[in-house]
Image (cartoon, coloured by chain):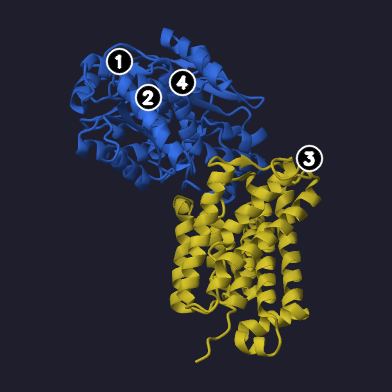
Amino acid sequence: MLGWTMAALLALGLAQEAGSTPPEKIKVGVVLSMTGDTAAFGEQTWAGLQVAKEMKPKVLDREIELVLVDDKSDKIEAAVAAQRVVQRDKVVAILGEVASSRSMAIASVAEAKKVPQISPSSTNPLVTQGKRYVFRACFIDSFQGEVIANFAVDHLEAKTAVVFKDIAQDYSVGLASFFKTTFVKRGGKITQELKYQTGDQDFSPQLTLLKSEPPDVIVVTGYYQEAAQIAKQARGLGLKSVFLAGDGAEAPELVQIGGAAVEGLYFSTHFDEKSATTALGDAYVKAFRKKHQTAPDGLGALGADAYFMLAGAIEQAGSAEPEKIRTALEQLKGFEGVSGVITVDAKHNTLKSAVIRTVKNGEFVYVATVNP
Amino acid sequence: MDLILQQLINLLSLGSLYALVAIGYTLVYGVLRLINFAHGDVLMLGAYLALFLLTGMHLSPVPLPWPLAFAGAVALTALAGVALERVAYRPLRSAPRLSLLITAIGASLFLENFGIVAFGGRPLAFPDVGNLDRVVQLGALSVPILSLWIPGVTALTLGVTFWIVYRSKVGMAMRAISRDRETAQLMGVDTNRVISLTFGLGSALAAVGGIMWSLKFAQVNPLMGVLPGIKAFVAAVLGGIGSVAGAALGGFLLGGLEVLFVAFLPDWSGYRDALAFFILIAILLLRPTGIMGEELPE
């Protein structure tokens, strides 16, 4: 047995010796929630990242290697994972996270270690605010809140709204407040604001408070598990309000858990096959359908965008040094990504259109595209 | 008025769910003086087993009708509980109490991570069986059928547990062991067998709790046992850990306080878990034996 192993090792060594040594791989850290409360986010983003990597496996003739670390949907674990990929794996950049709170935890490491970070889909403005090394591939919540509020007023003719917000998530708190600002400005009335925390399962006491005066719309600014649960329990209590949510609701689990209760729920997100406007977007849709046999979603598209942004920046810089990547990212203008055209502004944000989708017969269906 | 009645229905359904899980928690403590931190994770295991039998995934070649699937899951979880005791707790029977406590935490972490590896990190939908999802409208009141089933199952479970502990021969042995294990052994009680049975019963109760929990919240995930475990622990301490009736009472009280907390202080509704821990600290400071707990001997 030992002899065989030795022989195999020797053969392997000889083979390497014979060919010219391949150029060193470019290591990129990927920190995502593959398990825990928002496990779907990690898997959705990873699905998109893998498609992007297959579409463009190399830059500067060097292969890109993605080092994936699971943060268990936990802020502290996210910071630990970022430390790990920087110190142990010596990555040149970090891609991640989806949840804004966790992106901010990674950002503190990225700033301290001077390694560029691209968050594919963290929409809270604070994620990049005042940061040198942190970028994002998505729009921000001041825009998303506006989109949801305008949709409620224009399409649903809503006059009253109840907001559910997850006080454990910066994303949810921020989005709730941006929604409120626009909704009130447009003449709507927020009748109640109800709070919960990630992981809460029983919402019937809060929802019971709405029975005497049901609002036109219930806006859930948190993530998919709780959104599904809130919708389900609201229908159980006989509430007929229309449900609205942000991009945090987009996961297959919303329908699997929510069932009939989430039919007719509207949410804003970043991408739909029908909204693809770029050549890269069309190519991505084809490649995604071929690899995963399902329709692409917003988080996957943004995962791919973060990857393409990074690859583009490395090409632009002509080097995989973190500092040079950072400078190139800052100068990224009119980059034709998967989900739209990305132009990094002075605050490291980008203006992009949002997509409204709804749940119809258990599927996510395209409703409209909203331009900034 | 309608609102109050509706909140009472919410209370009944949540409180009895906590009570159901707390009964199993307290049973093991009562006999072994072991806080079985893995109880919530055994609950998770029970829920997954029920789902697999119900849908014909992995365990069963065909989807089973729900009474059969649930009975099967309860039985299998009981066996898993017995195995857990055999592997993790029995070798430490004469070790200091602290070692057992640490092993229990280890068992809990093991089961959670086993769940993640074996069942995947993403939640699976738990199907609605026997149309329990239905909601009956009584005037302005909405009564989910499940809200009536859960208290019923809890009452039945409580009855059966009482009968076993206070009326059956095994129960007598359990009580004897909880008083003084060595003396019970000297009197000819097969302690290993009785302790195994206790674990089996406790795990079966956890499985029942897990099934009801999954029916109510329509999903299972590998970490779903953490919260029920903590809540049941608080409920058991509140009622007096070791006392079966106390656990049921503690469960209802905790569920009731949570519902009232949210109903009257909606602004604070994000802190309902903090309330549970506040209650835990308060009860440990003011009345460590709980509401119905036995007085500690001097």
Q: Which chain is yellow?
A: B
Q: CA distance from mark 2 to mark 3?
A: 50 Å
Q: Position of residue A299 (x, y in %)?
A: 45, 26
Q: Position of residue B161 (x, y in %)?
A: 72, 71
Hey, what amino acid is under mark 3? Val
Give the colour chain A carries in the figure: blue
Dot 1 crowding, Cα within 10 Å, few <14, some 14–19, many 20+:
few
Q: Which residue is mark 2?
A: A143
Q: Is residue B217 left or right of residue A340?
A: right
Which residue is pictured at 72% across the width and 82% down the height? B172
- Of the residues under marks 1 and 4, which one precedes in the sequence? 4
Furthest residue to the front? A3
Kindly indicate whether the residues beneath marks 4 and 2 are on one polypeptide chain.
yes
Q: Which residue is mark 1?
A: A61
Can you tell which of label 1 and label 4 is closer to the viewer? 1
Q: Position of residue B153 (x, y in %)?
A: 74, 60
Under circle 1, the secondary element is: loop
C-beta proximity under 8 Å, tags 1 and 4: no
Question: Picture quarter containing residue B118?
Answer: top right
**Figure quadrant of the C terminus of chain A:** top left
Question: Picture quarter containing residue B128?
Answer: top right
Hey, what amino acid is under mark 4? Val
Q: Which residue is mark 3?
A: B62
